[in-house]
Image (cartoon, rainbow, N blue to C red):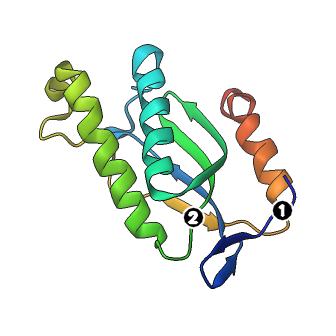
Amino acid sequence: MANKLNSLAHTKWLCKYHIVFIPKYRRKAIFNQYRRDLRDYIRLLCKYKGVEIIKGHMMPDHVHLLVSIPPKLSVSQFMGYLKGKSALMMFDRHANLKYKYGNRHFWAEGYYVSTVGLNESTIKKYIRDQEKHDIG
């Protein structure tokens, strides 16, 4: 993907971020049906907020996203929304999670974020090759 400008009514923008977040206690919980459901929930929630997923990858104990977030939405607002809503959706669908996590908190507090400029292809490759990095 080239550096395509996005538009709002009176604004042109190019705001890309590499975001990483983990399940509470860094449990290896993202697999099989949980992984499929989280993928669908994250796609849906991003679509609702007008956030474009450029690249994403889920590992058993963390999620990588390369996203384009509109400037009307701060990264912290978006992450609060994404983690909060996806956790509620997971607990609604998988009631057994309450025994591991209690109080409907699927995600750990906080996240990693960095802005993406001209190194987008490097970050895409890093996300794509996550399993090689973690195993090696």
Q: Secondary structure at mark 1?
A: loop
Q: Is residue 116 above or below residue 124?
A: below
Q: Residue at x 67, y 72 (%)?
A: 7
Residue 131 location in percent, x, y? Answer: 68, 28
Closer to us: mark 1 or mark 2? 2
Gap in angstroms between the C-alphas marked 1 and 2: 17 Å
Residue located farthest toward the front when viewing the structure as drawn: 9
State the image coordinates of residue 51 (x, y, percent, origin top left): 55, 56
Q: Which mark is residue 78?
A: none
Please tell me which residue is depicted at 46% across the width and 14% down the height of the picture.
Answer: 32
Front-lying residue, 40 or 75 = 40
| Residue placed furthest toward the bottom | 10
Asked whether disc 1 touches disc 2, contact meaning CB atoms under 8 Å apart, the reply is: no
- Pointer 2 residue: 69
Circle 2: residue type? Ile
Q: Residue at label 1? A: 119
Whether residue 90 appears in this view of the structure is yes
Mark closer to the chain start, 1 or 2: 2
In screen coordinates, is 108 left or right of 59? Answer: left
Is residue 60 depicted above or below 123 in this figure? above
Q: Amino acid at mark 1?
A: Asn
SS class, disc 2: loop
Q: Quadrant of the C terminus?
A: top right
Q: Is residue 29 left or right of residue 118?
A: left
**Residue 101 position in % (x across, y down):** 20, 34
Identify whether 100 is placed above or below 81. above
Residue at the image point whose x is 83% and y is 62% from the top? 119
